[in-house]
Amino acid sequence: MIELERECVLVLMRQVSEYMWREVNLGGNEGCQMSSEKSIKKLKVVMNLLLILVRTNLTVLTSINNNNINNDLIYNSMDWLIKWYIFNSVDNSTELSPSIHLMKRISKLVLGFFNKIRKDPLICKLALRSLISIYQ
């Protein structure tokens, strides 16, 4: 377990989720099949950053006071992660290209992150708000 301070976890969560949504938004299997070497490098960066985030002690997030700035930061991060997972998750592809392989690993890491934070009522509330906004 990696121990980071709350602010560091918040910044890491925000930066990783924003980068994923803006730079590694390939569109699932079809997008991966047409990905370039540049995309594969970006996927590797995301995977390594997600590994750090998933291995971090996220209980520091539960100590967040009801601070609107932090809540907005968490909401935006969860919004980007949820959207990325919905539109890019690769779980059942049988193709074994390097980009599909990386997307499968990243999808599992994002799902692992969701499982890890599900015990936190504040983060779950913000994640639900994000889900509702996606489907409205």
Image (tube, rainbow, N blue to C red):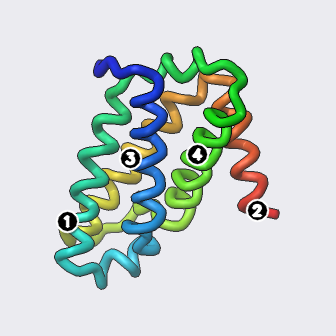
Distance from label 2 to label 3 (Cα)? 23 Å
Residue ranking furthest to the right: 136
The x and y percentages for residue 118 are: 59, 29
Near mark 1 (Cα within 10 A), the count class, few <14, some 14-19 or many ≥20, is: some
Distance from label 1 to label 3 (Cα)? 18 Å
Reading the image, the residue beneath label 2 is: 135
Q: Is residue 71 above or below residue 120?
A: below
Does the residue at mark 2 contact the one at mark 3 (Cβ under 8 Å)?
Answer: no
Label 2 sits on what residue type?
Tyr
Taking the spot 25% from the left edge, 61% from the top edge, the residue there is 101
Q: Nearer the viewer, residue 39 or 11?
A: 11
Near mark 3 (Cα within 10 A), the count class, few <14, some 14-19 or many ≥20, is: some
Reading the image, the residue beneath label 4 is: 78
Label 4 sits on what residue type?
Met
Near mark 4 (Cα within 10 A), the count class, few <14, some 14-19 or many ≥20, is: many
Taking the spot 66% from the left edge, 42% from the top edge, the residue there is 72
Dot placed on the residue nearer the N-terminal end, 2 or 4: 4
Q: Is residue 98 above or below residue 75?
A: below
Quadrant of the rendered structure where residue 94 is?
bottom left
**Residue 96 shows up from this direction:** no
Reading the image, the residue beneath label 3 is: 108
Reading the image, the residue beneath label 1 is: 41
**Residue 80 shows up from this direction:** yes
Secondary structure type for disc 3: helix
Q: Is residue 118 above or below residue 29?
A: above
Secondary structure type for disc 4: helix
Dot placed on the residue nearer the N-terminal end, 1 or 2: 1
Dot placed on the residue nearer the N-terminal end, 2 or 3: 3
The x and y percentages for residue 11 are: 44, 38
Does the residue at mark 4 contact the one at mark 1 (Cβ under 8 Å)?
Answer: no
Dot placed on the residue nearer the N-terminal end, 1 or 3: 1
Label 1 sits on what residue type?
Lys
